[in-house]
Amino acid sequence: MIEFVWWGFLLLLPLAFILRLLLQPADSVDDFALRTPYYQNWLQLYQTSDITKEKRLLRFILLSLIWIFLVLAVARPQYVGEPIELPASGRDLLLAVDISGSMEATDLKLMGKKATRLDVVKSVLNDFIDRREGDRIGLILFGEQAYLQTPLTFDRTTVKKMLDESVIGLAGASRTAIGDGIGLAVKRLRERDADSRVLVLLTDGQNNTGAVDPLKAAQLASQIGVKIYTIGVGAEEMVVESFFGQRTLNPSKDLDEKTLIQVAKTTGGQYFRAKDTIQLEEIYAVLDKIEPVESNPETFRPVKSLFYWPLAVSLIIAFLLALEKLIRFKVASRTKDELKGETTHHA
């Protein structure tokens, strides 16, 4: 539908026509203010002009249209579209993903084939992000340092793209700064005014670098109401081939579950252990239930301004009237020169 922001200006529409009725008409052609040479010739030229009653009526209609469209433009018409539902839970959800060198281990499977831990995490997280319609989602990547890869946003497509483009070593590959990742998340979430602030942290190692201790960062998170869910990822057994035959290793021996459990407990969250892709998918399904998306959406109606259309129409009509008047002036000037020549010849 079309609405007018300043609809009160529409009351001015009849003003021009009322003034035309009330004001005195212009003086007649017999009462010129200035007498000129060859007055009779000029008068004859005016009286024999090709401005007929029909043309005068057309000119009046065009001038009226200019006034009408100008008033419509001032009233600021706008098109209001159909309501669009925008689910909004008021939750800020940060995802902190470990991209240190250990995430390159191929102890997990994706679609039946061996894959790196990071590739599995990307695949499962993409589905999780798709389901979080209504949450503001951000992405933190950490290795030796922690970086805010994507600020909190409703644009889930961008978050997924930035996650897919993350690679091992982007934040340093040799060590893992879990505390710095939590600290950066707390800093970003503290600046937000949200009904719920949540951090989901995924790692396969232990905190062995960085300026912030994970437990102290968790205490600070608890003070400002940030809930942290921690996920330890990695298989417990992995068979490898060696010169002496097959060996069974524990690829998750460096995983510091004790610290991750304490971090989650301090903030009122939970710790989850993902030993394979199925368990990781189940964990994110559980998170969907623990932190459900708001079911009552907000309504948004797109608005598009239309004032430039009536304004453009009025300008075009005014331009055409001015052009027509200029053409008539040139024709009259040419006729005047011809009359002047004839008078000189007779003299």
Image (spheres, rainbow, N blue to C red):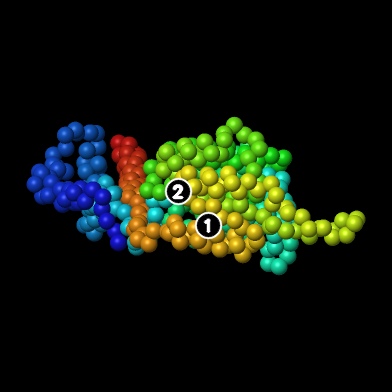
| Horizontal and vertical percent position of residue 87 | 39, 58
Q: Quadrant of residue 86?
A: bottom left
Amino acid type, label 1: Ile
Q: In the rendered image, which residue does mark 1 sit on?
A: 129
Q: Residues within 10 Å of mark 1 (few under 14, many from 20)?
A: some
Question: Which residue is painted at 12% across and 49% down in the image?
Answer: 18
Task: Name the mark nearer the viewer: 1 or 2.
Answer: 2
Which image quarter is the N terminus in? bottom left
Amino acid type, label 2: Gly
Q: Is residue 231 left or right of residue 30?
A: right
Q: Residue 209 versus residue 133: which sits nearer the camera?
A: 209
| Horizontal and vertical percent position of residue 295 | 37, 62
Q: Residue 24 versus residue 230: which sits nearer the camera?
A: 230
Whichever of labels 1 and 2 marks the residue nearer the N terminus, that label is 1
Question: Which residue is painted at 35% across and 61% down in the image?
Answer: 296
Considering only vertical position in the picture, is 114 above or below 267? below
| Horizontal and vertical percent position of residue 337 | 35, 40
Q: Quadrant of residue 276?
A: bottom right
Q: In the rendered image, which residue does mark 2 sit on?
A: 268
Question: Which residue is painted at 65% across and 41% down in the image?
Answer: 176
Residue placed furthest toward the front: 258
Which image quarter is the C terminus in? top left
Report, in whole angstroms, how far the alpha carbon at label 1 lies from the one at label 2: 22 Å
Q: Residues within 10 Å of mark 2 (few under 14, many from 20)?
A: some
